[in-house]
Image: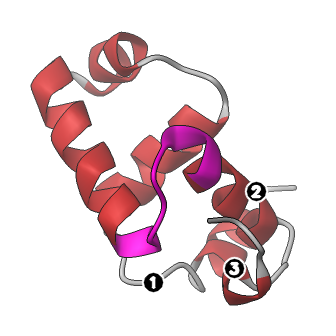
């Protein structure tokens, strides 16, 4: 799926900023906090802060649940219809 199509589908994720979506996508690819920080030129603390915000906004407890919601949204599956959590 190309970036434009993924972006169109992930617009259905509730109120995530562009940076949060970027970090969520990288998390969904299996990157660690340290790898995300290095690639985005952030501190690990900043990545953790963004992930906490993402988890709160999505109503999930961990990166696996967040990744499932992201993958569903990227494939056009309504995140609200997901049974995660």
Mark 3 — residue?
79
What's the residue at 36%, 82% (across, down)? Answer: 15
What's the residue at 48%, 44% (across, down)? Answer: 62
Q: CA distance from mark 3 to mark 1?
A: 9 Å
Mark 1 — residue?
14
What's the residue at 25%, 59% (across, down)? Answer: 53
Q: CA distance from mark 2 to mark 3?
A: 9 Å
Q: Position of residue 5 (x, y in %)?
A: 77, 70
Quadrant including the C terminus: bottom right
Magenta segment includes 67: no
Q: Position of residue 8 (x, y in %)?
A: 67, 79
Circles 2 and 1 in contact, beta carbons < 8 Å: no
User: Is 24 above or below relative to 58?
Assistant: above
Which quarter of the figure has residue 75? bottom right
User: Is 70 above or below relative to 17?
Assistant: above
Q: Bin the neighbour count of mark 1 within 10 Å (Cα to Cα): few under 14, some 14-19, many 20 and up.
A: few
Task: Return the mark for residue 66.
Answer: none
Q: Position of residue 66 (x, y in %)?
A: 56, 54
Q: How is the image coloured?
A: secondary structure
Task: Return the mark for residue 71.
Answer: 2
Q: Secondary structure at mark 2?
A: helix
Q: Which residues are magenta?
A: 57-65
């Amino acid at each position: 799926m190309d970036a434009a199509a993924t972006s169109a589908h992930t617009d259905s994720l509730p109120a995530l900023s562009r940076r949060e979506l970027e970090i969520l996508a990288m998390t969904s690819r299996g990157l660690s906090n340290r790898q995300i920080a290095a690639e985005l030129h952030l501190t690990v603390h900043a990545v953790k802060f963004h992930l906490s915000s993402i988890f709160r906004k999505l109503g999930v407890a961990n990166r696996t649940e967040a990744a499932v919601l992201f993958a569903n949204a990227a494939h056009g599956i309504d995140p609200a219809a997901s049974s995660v959590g």
